[in-house]
Image: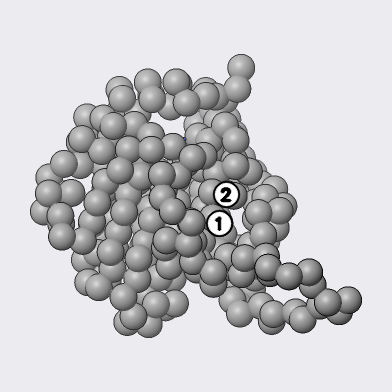
Amino acid sequence: MAYDKKQATEEFGRWSESYDRCVLQWLLFGPSHRALIRRIGAVAEGRPASILDVGCGTGVFASRVREAIPDARVVGVDLVSDMLTQGAHRWRALADAVHPVQGDSERLPFASGSFDFVTCANSFHHYPNQERAVAEMHRVLKPGGRLLLIDGYRDAPWGWFIYDVCVTYREGNVHHASAQRFREILDRAGFQAVAQKVHRGPAPFLLNEAIAAEPAPLYPAPHFHLRTPATAPREAEV
Ligand SMILES: C[S@@+](CC[C@H](N)C(=O)[O-])C[C@H]1O[C@@H](n2cnc3c(N)ncnc32)[C@H](O)[C@@H]1O
């Protein structure tokens, strides 16, 4: 049976109380947050940045990014209110710059073109309709804004064992997308300059980075196409 939002709500409702103390904080979540913060710092280059963190959980990443990039304004959105509630002390402490919102990745409750960055860490495999979630991420980004999407890397034997065998056994029929599948979904949503980097380690993960294209022109395109050069370097191709 396919994993659905009712299962996600039950799973994270149960897990929320112990979530911040689990071993994955050290094995996977911490390293993935550091990778995101490095990229945001490198791209923003000291300019103020508005960030939407999709599947933000208890707000650990939101508070880390705010600590590392003091000008950042962060909105965290999560389906499961128990996860947001567990992070209440963080949201309160950073109330001037960090805001939690309860909502679904597949129907983001924000206006189009609102954010410089959309981040999503360790949450994507829970989304029943991943294409729709990526289309929503594209919609809420400003033209030229950047998506940074991390999930478990399951294309090599160790990652396959962890994510497709162990995680699936524990969480149910979640879906870790392959690198190829990520590229297809991102291309289809209209993202450009897609780059992917594998982070090796005990819990390997894949960082997908892409730029939101300009909106479609108001008038019909001429018979020739002006191509915008890809601005993000292709890092380590998978
Ligand atoms: C493993 S946690 C990751 C939390 C955080 N991003 C981190 O790196 O620590 C996955 C999160 O995704 C959230 N989630 C699951 N399905 C979701 C959906 N459809 N929309 C938004 N959030 C969702 C869960 O509630 C949970 O908080």
Colour mapping: one colour
Which residue lies under the disc numbered 2?
Answer: 134
Picture residue at 35% right of the left edge, 45% below the top: 77
Amino acid beneath label 1:
His
Percent position of residue 229, x then y: 69, 81
Is residue 96 found left or right of 130 in the rendered image? left
Vertical order, 188 against 126 (above or below): below
Q: Which mark is residue 226?
A: none
Contact, CB < 8 Å: mark 2 with mark 1?
yes
Can you see residue 191?
yes
Which residue lies under the disc numbered 1?
Answer: 138
Instruction: Identify the image quadrant of the C terminus.
Output: bottom right
Is residue 95 found left or right of 10 in the rendered image? left
Q: CA distance from mark 2 to mark 1?
A: 6 Å
Q: Nearer the viewer, residue 195 or 236?
A: 195
Can you see residue 36?
no
Percent position of residue 237, x then y: 67, 66
**Label 2 lies in ligand 1 vicinity (Cβ under 8 Å):** no
Q: Nearer the viewer, residue 160 or 149?
A: 149
Picture residue at 28% right of the left edge, 68% below the top: 72
Picture residue at 12% right of the left edge, 49% below the top: 92
Vertical order, 108 against 71 (above or below): above
Amino acid beneath label 2:
Val
Instruction: Identify the image quadrant of the N terminus.
Output: top right
Query: How busy is the neighbourhood of tag 2: few (under 14 within 10 Å), some, or many (20 plus)?
Result: many
- Most distant residue in the right direction: 223
Task: Give the quarter of the image for residue 191.
Answer: bottom right
Is residue 110 found left or right of 94 in the rendered image? right
